[in-house]
Image: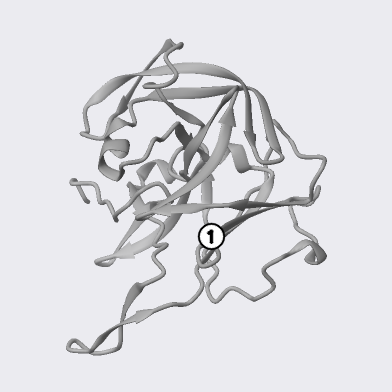
Amino acid sequence: ALASLLLLFLMFACSLGAMARTSGPGAEVKKEHSVVNLSIFYSGDSVNNCDDFKTLVIPIKRIQNLIIIEARIDTIIGNFILDTGSPILVLNKTYFRKGWDANLLAANAGGTATPVMRTRVNDLAIRELFFENLPADLNDLGHIENHRGIKILGLLGVSLFTSFEMVIDVHKSVLYLHKLDKNGMVPETERIVKSEPTLHVPFKLIRNTITIDVMMAGKKLVFCVDTGAEANDLRNRLP
């Protein structure tokens, strides 16, 4: 049963200079510079208005292992982290202070349970992708700003992209959003990246969280694919 599986966190390994080891315990470590693409297929309802495009090309910036996208919340334009580990939109409460107590608890960066604050934004714009009357969580993202020296307005979570196929081309610093048809597919004529992926990994979307099955030390575990994480993170209580 899904409830019996342990949910862990997995960083999306998006480094262009990824280290690869050839076979053998004493093998030489070398760098690989291949293009890294992450294709994620969602099929679900979204509150977006995307009738004007079939494919949206969004420039991205990389700050260490973070993927940064420029977006607009109401009248404020700034940096957002593409965060597939977050189910919904999260706003930095340093800049967005109006909200209410959602009567929920969530663990902060230090592992301490803190009250969840909720808010609602009038509109969010990511280039030609628009959202209106959008719910969001409020959280303190100051630790990320201080650590990376960049102003962060919020996190772009999974629920924003449930009507798209997402392709992240780290080599070209571009995010492609392909609008899905009624069958949850993208017409081949709309694809920009034509090459076949070298690896297909099935996943489950559980409460807007992308999970994959992983075998570790002979045990089946569940990992969360999290583009907002900067390191592989394991829960300290493993089965």
Residue 226 in sight: no
Q: Residue at x 39, y 65 (%)?
A: 15
Residue 209 screen position, x and y as percent = 48, 42
Whether residue 110 sits left or right of residue 182 in the image: it is left
Q: Give residue 121's quadrant in the image.
A: top right
| Disc 1 secondary structure class | loop
Q: Give residue 212's quadrant in the image.
A: bottom left
Q: Residue at x 47, y 47 (%)?
A: 68
Q: What amino acid type is highlighted by mark number 1?
A: Ser
124 and 189: which is toward the camera: 124
Q: Give residue 217's quadrant in the image.
A: bottom left
Residue 185 screen position, x and y as percent = 75, 56
Which residue position holds label 1? Answer: 173
Q: In the displayed structure, would residue 183 be above or below residue 149?
A: below
Whether residue 117 sits left or right of residue 201 in the image: it is left
Q: Residue at x 59, y 22 (%)?
A: 75
Residue 225 screen position, x and y as percent = 43, 52
Q: Residue at x 81, y 47 (%)?
A: 182
Whether residue 65 sits left or right of residue 120 in the image: it is left
Residue 171 in sight: yes
Residue 170 screen position, x and y as percent = 50, 63
Mark 1, residues whose alpha carbon is within 10 Å: few (<14), some, or many (≥20)?
some
Colour scheme shown: one colour
Q: In the displayed structure, would residue 59 be above or below residue 15?
A: above
151 and 7: which is toward the camera: 151
Q: In the displayed structure, would residue 200 be above or below residue 7?
A: below
75 and 171: which is toward the camera: 75
The number of discs equals: 1
Q: In the displayed structure, would residue 229 be above or below residue 98?
A: below
